[in-house]
Image: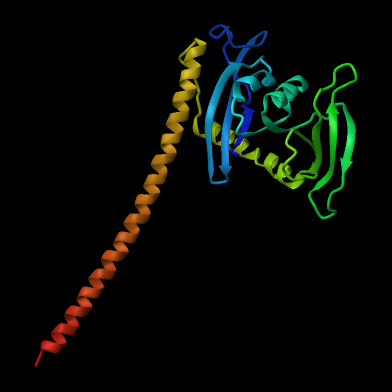
Amino acid sequence: MPLKIIDSSSTLPLNLNNHKWATFRKTKAGIKLHLRLVFMDKDNVYPEKSVITPAKEHDRNQLEVLVDDKEAMYVFDRGYVDDERFDRMTDDGYFFVSRLKKNAVIRKVTSFSLPDDGTVLSEKMVYIGTTQKRTENVFRLLEVMDTKGNLLRLITNRFDSSAEEISDIYRSRWAIELFFKWLKTTCRNKAFLWNERNCYTESSVFSAYYLLLTCLIQLEIEKQKIFTANHSLVKESALETILCLTRKFEERSSP
């Protein structure tokens, strides 16, 4: 089952006079890039789908746009947390793991025992929400410690994987953070020539293709360097062999 990570970029500020559609604040416009990244393993990560929205629009509104594959496992952070959508995703057959907000209300159904030497501190089956507005489905709640010693509460509707596997799946979310960092340092836009929303969408697609093509070219260059180096070694080795055989032949031929 492929792993698909969802996250949004930080707000990209724009001039309000030229970009009235990109609502953000009273005196400033802005946009956000919502991205879906396919994570096969640490060496096989690539962007699959992106959406440009005004910065004022909440992240969780994009879940229904970015979640469309029932054969995948989705990972996203607490900015996308929405109890009602969790219920709909579960009813529709979509699997996910996310992080609960600190103030999220839960009602415990049961707890599970865990090995003492594991990284998962606790595992429970819970409902999410208050009495007036509670989820219809039960979910799996894991408490884990991150590398900085912070307590994380992970929520998932996946019950066929071990607690350690769910924890590792969420940790892979770091890949999209690295991708955004790479994107920010590689594609440094100082000014924008367009005012229309569609132009930004087309530009983001073009930029993604450009960056991916750049990566492919870099990989090909590295391959050529390795090939050239190896080819030179082979040539030098072959030449030394020929010279050595020639000398031996001359020694045998001399009276």
Q: 134 or 223: nearer the eye?
A: 134
The residue that appears at 20% across and 74% down in the rendered structure is: 242
Q: How many marks?
A: 0
Extreme residue toward the bottom, this view? 255
Locate residue 106, reporting x and y percent. Answer: 87, 28
The image shows residue 56, relative to residue 76, as above or below, that is above
Q: Quadrant of residue 245?
A: bottom left
Is 110 left, or right, of 93 in this rendering? right
Q: Quadrant of the N terminus?
A: top right
Locate residue 133, reporting x and y percent. Answer: 85, 17
Q: 193 or 107: nearer the eye?
A: 107
Locate residue 208, reporting x and y percent. Answer: 47, 29
Is 146 left, or right, of 39 in this rendering? right
The image shows residue 168, relative to residue 181, as above or below, that is below
Extreme residue toward the left, this view? 255
Q: Quadrant of residue 14?
A: top right
Q: 30 or 32: nearer the eye?
A: 32
Is 249 left, or right, of 233 in this rendering? left
Q: 125 or 49: nearer the eye?
A: 125
The residue that appears at 45% across and 33% down in the rendered structure is: 211
Is 236 left, or right, of 145 in this rendering? left
The residue that appears at 53% across and 8% down in the rendered structure is: 18
Locate residue 115, reporting x and y percent. Answer: 83, 53
Q: Quadrant of the C terminus?
A: bottom left
Q: Describe the colour scheme in one phrase.
A: rainbow
The residue that appears at 50% across and 18% down in the rendered structure is: 201
